[in-house]
Image: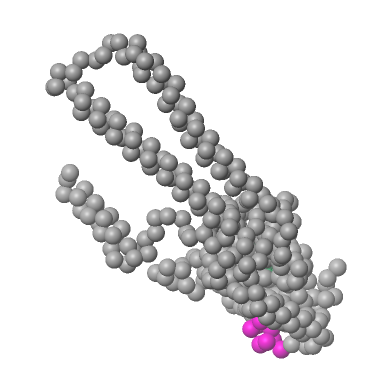
Amino acid sequence: MSKRGLGWLNGLVTSVFAGGVMADWEINLPEPVSPVTREIFDLHMLTAGVALVIMIIVTAVIMYSLWKHRKSAGFEADQHFHESGFGKWAWVFVPVVVLGIDLSIAGKAAKVFDLVEDTTKPELTLKVIGSQWKWTYEYLEDDIRLVANLNRDIPETDPLYLRDTDHRVILPVDTRIRFLHTATDVLHAWWVPALAYKKDSIPGYINETWSIIEKEGVYRGQCAEICGTGHAFMPIVIEAVSKEKYAAWVQDKKLAAAAALVEASADKVWSKDDLMARGQEVYAGNCLACHQAEGQGVPPVFPALKGGLITTGEIAGHIDIVLNGKPGTAMAAWAAQLNDLEIAAVVTYERNAWGNDTGDVVQPADIKAARK
Ligand code: HEC
Ligand SMILES: [Cu+2]
């Protein structure tokens, strides 16, 4: 091998086996913490084990045959092998053994399938909605809605880069949870290997999975269906807590939602500074993924809002596109997703940030009036 080739190999070996990398270098699937993922894990270990044994036997037979029947030892091929009893029956015997192994794996796999599809009797139902590029969670029994965006403050050097979100999905342990999967735009797939198996999120369809989380902790996953340029930016972070902690979290969430509703619908007139501060938060949580941090967008797919015709033009047109979206494009209608205060704040923000400086201030009452 050339010197250059060796240098390259050396680089590869040292980078793979360098201490830090080696420390959390896991070869197998993540440790399962739910009944159904454990069954899948066991099935994976069974098939991998069977494959390993077969590989060892076949390799050994090949090595032995090559060595035993080598020409230098004067070996001559047996011209009458097929006439012996073994020569006749081996062709039947070997496939029967292989089929037997296959069928025993298939039997086990069929049982796992039954378990996977058993989405009956849930104690808690979480609707998981995939969108470009975020996950929205609806706790159906408790009427809680949660939007999880990529946490953009994690540097590239951090192991959690692209693996952390701004809001965690809180779920109770030892509870039978049903996940309902759907999407608003294109195919996505919600996948947390330790807890639940992969299932596509399809616009207009509902798919189901289920889980019982057996251990408190933080579990991570990703979108597992390529869904566009931001596919890598929709991680999943689940925090499993005790049932008591979960109940307290639900209570807090409900109180906060009620307070936000009261605040948004009160006919209060807000100062520009307050609206700008709020608007920046709303923008970061909902709009930044497409329109970007400096409002520069990703033309031609996502228009720039900095110096945009709509963001610096008529206020009514601006409010209209945020409330109702633009059908047939990735610009969603936000009317049902954001309250009057949030929309007023984000519109005010977009009209004054990044040098747009229109000086316009939009109040929640204006949004209320514009809603159809
Ligand atoms: C999934 C990507 C995406 C997200 C998220 C998104 N937008 Fe858009 N937005 C678009 C696209 C695409 C268009 C262009 C629609 C068209 O073809 O006219 C657009 C257009 C706009 C326009 C009109 C710009 C112009 O000059 O045409 C405004 C204003 C706007 N969006 C505001 C928002 C606000 C406010 C949010 C957050 C609450 C938001 N957008 C979130 C994709 C997105
Ligand atoms: Cu996706």
The scheme the figure's colours follow is: one colour
Residue 26: x and y in percent read 39, 59
Residue 71 location, x and y as percent?
17, 20
Residue at 73% over, 75% down:
343
Q: Quadrant of residue 128?
A: bottom right
Q: In the depicted view, which residue is nearer to us: 14 or 69?
A: 69
191 relative to 44 in the view: left or right = right
| Relative horizontal placement of residue 291, taking residue 247 as reference (left or right) | left
Give the percent coordinates (x, y) of residue 299.
58, 59
- What is the quadrant of residue 304 in the picture? bottom right
Give the position of the N terminus as an image quadrant: top left
Q: Position of residue 222 (x, y in %)?
A: 54, 60
Q: What's the residue at 77%, 81% (across, down)?
A: 258
Q: Residue at x 51, y 47 (%)?
A: 43
Residue situated in front as seen by the camera: 90 or 41: 90
As drawn, is 87 to the left or to the right of 29?
left
State the residue at coordinates (28%, 60%).
Answer: 17
Q: Report the number of discs.
A: 0
Judged by its main secondary structure, the magenta piece is: helix
Note whether residue 121 is visible: yes
276 is higher (above) or lower (below) than 79: below
Question: Is residue 26 found inside the magenta-colored segment of the image?
Answer: no
Seen in the image, is 74 located left or right of residue 324?
A: left
- Write the start and end of the magenta stretch as one range: 271-279
In this rendering, the answer to whether 323 lies above or below 88 is below
Q: Residue furthest front?
A: 85
Return the residue nearer the eye: 3 or 48: 48
Q: Is residue 165 visible?
A: no
Q: Which quarter shows the C terminus?
A: bottom right
